[in-house]
Image (cartoon, rainbow, N blue to C red):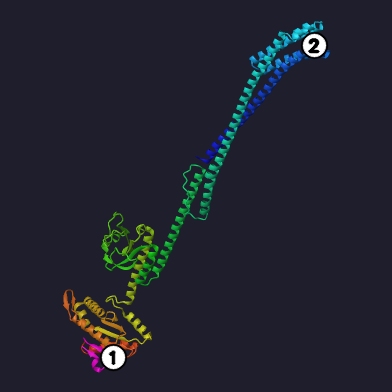
Amino acid sequence: MRITTITNWAYGITVVLTVLSAVAFILSARSATQERQAVEQHLLLSSMGEELALGAEETTDEARLYVMRGETRHLDAFTVDEGEERRRDAAINKLRGLGIPDGELQIVEEAVGDAEALDKIEEAAVATYRGGNQAGARDMLFGPEHERLQTALLNDVSQFRSLATARTEAAVHSAQARSNFWGDAAKIILALTAVIFLGVLYFILRRRVALPLVQMTGVVNRLARQDYAVELPTERRRDEIGEMNDAIQIFRENGLERNRLDAERKRDLQTKDLILQMMHRLQACYAQNELTEVVALFVPQIFPGIAGCLYTMNESKSALTEVSRWLDPIHTQPSFPATACWGLRRGRPHVSHVADNDIACQHLDESGVPGLCVPLTALGEAIGLLYFEDRTEDATAVDAPQLYLELIAENIGLAIANLQLRDKLVNLAVRDALTGLFNRRSLDEALNNLHRDQSARTVVCMMIDIDHFKRFNDEFGHDAGDEVLRHVAQIVSDTVGDVGTVYRFGGEELTVIATDIADERGFDIAEKLRMSVFTTPFSYRGRIVGPLSISVGVASSPVSGPTTTLINRADGALLQAKLSGRNKTVAAFAMAAEGELKRG
């Protein structure tokens, strides 16, 4: 019930009780007045009866004294007392006006009649005495008739007084009882009014208003300090305090929602900032290994707690290989065919193992852990894949914003495409298009770097020439010559391995630069190259051609000469090998014995 309703009811009941209390007080006062009037009437009737009896006795006594003594003063007193008759008439009229009962009034009238009869006898006795008959007057005043009338008068007066006393005392008691009743009722009503007033003060003002307001004050103060974690007391009231509590609850919920939105906005801004930082660093990468480090560093910050991998497509666009990972994903393969991923097939993000609503990618295991595949594309071609694996219970990767995923995938794809294009351009600039070996420009740059190097590193140079190369071109065509060059270049690259670097010097000549090896080791490698080419069969269009052979000239620096003359000295050794009949290895080591300069 609402406080205003309770207050109105309490106010109405208080007003009603106050009115009833006032009525009770009025009735009590009126009963007190009736009690006072009854007492006054009792006193009046009692005094009137007494006066009636005393007046008759005084008149009789004066008459008798006059008859017995003959003194004039008694006659005067008797004459004066005769005026009592008029007073009796007035008293009777007054009694009639008081509305006394007829029985009492009849007794009074009988008493008055007896008194008048006595007066007549006494007047006659006085007249008889004054006529000289003293004995007759005495007989009249002391005779039986006089005694009878006097006794009857006294009896009437006594009976009147008894009746009047009984009636007036009953009226007094009745009025007193009514006065006490209404007085007690007024007190009870006043006490009830006070109880209701105190109850309203306690239950309404204290329990239903003051205490809830004190609690709400603490809650509002904490909400004012944006402490929205405060819990509101559960109020099921349907009054103003309940409405206020509901309003505060709505304010708290709005504050919590605002904090949640602010937190989401901050997380969103932080995510955007991290994506922007990652984009800047991706654009600044010069190599794919740098790109993989950037991705492995920033993607876990953008999507916390989510493991993942970065895959790149091979040149034939048939398979993907893992190049970067973060937080150790365990439900995908390090490499797999491109057809094993539905994301690459569809060209859009694909979710696997979520309520079994869609088909799962084949590169995932059967654990049922949700996985998200986001293809990387550039210029309309697929170049890689981003894989996310849920390591949390709330499936954050699956619920990741589509816009952010597409933005990250687009930027990583463009960065990988740019690096691949850059590598192609660099390869075109530093490598030979036919053999894939480093070109003459790269060789000159490497020799210049070695010349500028002040660490006195040992450098071995091998000049290689394919024997009778012109004959292959003339007999089989230039395509065959190209195949021969590629065949020999592959054998030389495989044989040299990590020991040195292979360059195409020009035409059918190749150059190998090896550092930090001894002259003898360099010569052995050159001889191994010659034997590998000679012993490896070469087929062209299904036909064995050959055997192929090469001539090798070897020179070293700085012991045998400066780096600036290294190519010339190796080329001189190569010329000597060709003049000696080809398919030979000749070393131009200054300190070598004459017998060790040739082998073949």
Vertical side of 523 occupied by 227: above or below: above
- Give residue 309's position: percent from left, percent from top: 33, 65
Give the CA distance from mark 1 to mark 2.
Answer: 206 Å
First to last magenta residue range: 583-600
**558 versus 353 height, above or below:** below
**Outermost residue toward the left in this view:** 543
Secondary structure of the residue carrying tag 1 is: loop
**Nearest the camera: 107 or 566?**
107
Q: Given the image, on which type of amino acid does mark 2 rest?
A: Met
Q: In which quarter of the image is residue 546?
A: bottom left
Where is residue 93 drawn, in percent x and y? 70, 15
- Count the marks: how many? 2
> Which amino acid lies under the numbered mark 1 shown in the image of this protein?
Phe
- Mark 2 = which residue? 68
Question: Residue at 18% of width from left, 76% of height from top?
Answer: 539
Left or right of 27 on screen, residue 444? left
Q: Quadrant of residue 321?
A: bottom left
Q: Mark 1 points at which residue?
A: 589
Residue 379 seen by the camera:
no
